[in-house]
Image: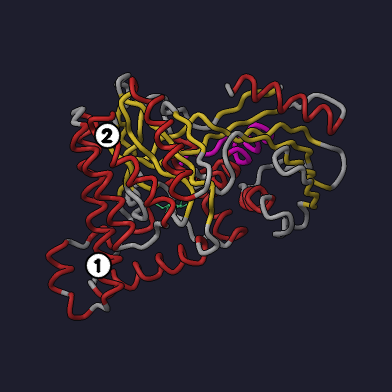
Amino acid sequence: MSLNRMLGRATEMFNRCFGHEPRWVAAAPGRVNLIGEHTDYNDGFVLPMAIDRHIVIAADTNPGRQVTLHSVTTGETASFGIRPKVEPGEPGWSNYIRGVIAGFPKTRKPLASFDAVIDSTLPYGGGLASSAALEVAAATLLEAMSGKVLDPIDKALLCQQAEHDFANVPCGIMDQFTSILAQENHALLLDCRSRTTTPVPMTDPAVTVLIINTNIRHKLAESEYAIRRSRCEAAARALKVPALRDATLPALEAARGQLDPLTFRRAHHVITENERTLEAAKAIQAADWDAVGRLMYASHASLRDDYQVSCPELDTIVEIARGIGKAGGVIGCRMTGAGFGGCAVSLVRTDAVQRITRKLDEAYERKTGRQTTIFYSRPAAGARVLKSS
Ligand code: GLA
């Protein structure tokens, strides 16, 4: 669905809920990460792109003391006060917005209470950064409402903090940065230490980005994420480097005796994934699709075996894609996002999209008894205000 249609739909829903037109509408995209997984919180490199799936918030101030949020997707409504301060609460999704309101810098005129409708074309919990998109859409809305435009990096950090404090997920910065800074027709090579971004053109019409949703989310996802992160920090301490970004494979090998085997494997993933990400960015620029494909499969194997954040359903998709292979038009495939379910990403030849989609659909159902959802996306632009009056 185009952003224009989303604007129309959110406006209509707002009208239905609150009886008048919204004054502001903001949108933020989800993302798919092409490569560079679980490297962002190790000060490393990631190569995501925003996708043409968005969260849209339509809003207007109200004269009362409560913020009221209505989610079109879940049908739930959240109501809460913002003074003296915003507290976490139910329903769970409202925390991403509560956190952004809580952290939004104070302006001379205090933030007014408001009514909002939230609409989405992003699968929730599908590993496509729906929570970051919700935070970024909220921050973009608050910028428009308050007239205070934030520096994009400060805005991303504010959204990340909201997720840490209000959703208890110690995420890195990839998702929020992408949702804010993405450029149309480009992936974004992000150095998560210096926070500099290099746009990588993705304009070859012969290549399409497919997103394949396993339609499952394993419960372990959030607790295991935090465990992975702290083990990486332990590995960096043992290797006497500020972050795993600074570690090398020879240094890791030399320290093998001092590290327990699991810590060794986690660090091995991060070190090799950083190398793969830099190589992949170069290979995309050189249109060396064979190399990109090899790096994607290697990334998946490392996430499955060393980092252990894949799951049988994701492995099945990657194996089906690999089976279709270069001859059938598949360039490469890997899990994307935090893992334990969610989506895989595959680069495929555009002229084979239909055939590949059909094969993936059929084989996934045959092997797992489940249905997959597949869509493709060009690299989309970052968050923006769709209406401000
Ligand atoms: C989630 C987090 C990101 C990143 C990925 C894994 O999407 O929000 O910060 O760590 O997992 O690469």
Mark 2 residue element: strand
Looking at the image, tell me whether mark 1 or mark 2 is earlier in sequence order: 1
* Quarter that holds the N terminus: top right
- Amino acid marked by disc 2: Ile
Mark 1 residue element: loop
Camera sees residue 351: yes
Residue 265 is one of the magenta-drawn residues: no
Residues rendered magenta in the picture: 137-153
> In the rendering, at what x and y percent does residue 139 appear?
60, 41
From the image, tell me which residue sits under label 2. Answer: 331
Relative to 243, say whether 348 is above or below.
Answer: above
Camera sees residue 46: no
Q: Place residue 9 in its image quadrant.
A: top right
On whether ligand 1 comes within 8 Å of the CB at mark 2, the answer is no
Q: Residues within 10 Å of mark 2 (few under 14, many from 20)?
A: many
Could you tell me what secondary structure mostly forms the magenta stretch?
helix
Front residue (pair 5, 176): 5
Residue drawn at (45%, 45%), measured in percent from left and top?
A: 366
Q: Which mark is residue 241?
A: 1
Front residue (pair 284, 20): 284
> In the rendering, at what x and y percent does residue 336 appear?
40, 46
Residue drawn at (43%, 48%), measured in percent from left and top?
A: 367
Relative to 212, say whether 101 is above or below.
Answer: below
* Nearer mark to the viewer, of 1 and 2: 2
Left or right? Give the position of 88 relative to 289.
Answer: right
- Amino acid marked by disc 1: Val
Residue drawn at (44%, 29%), measured in percent from left and top?
A: 376
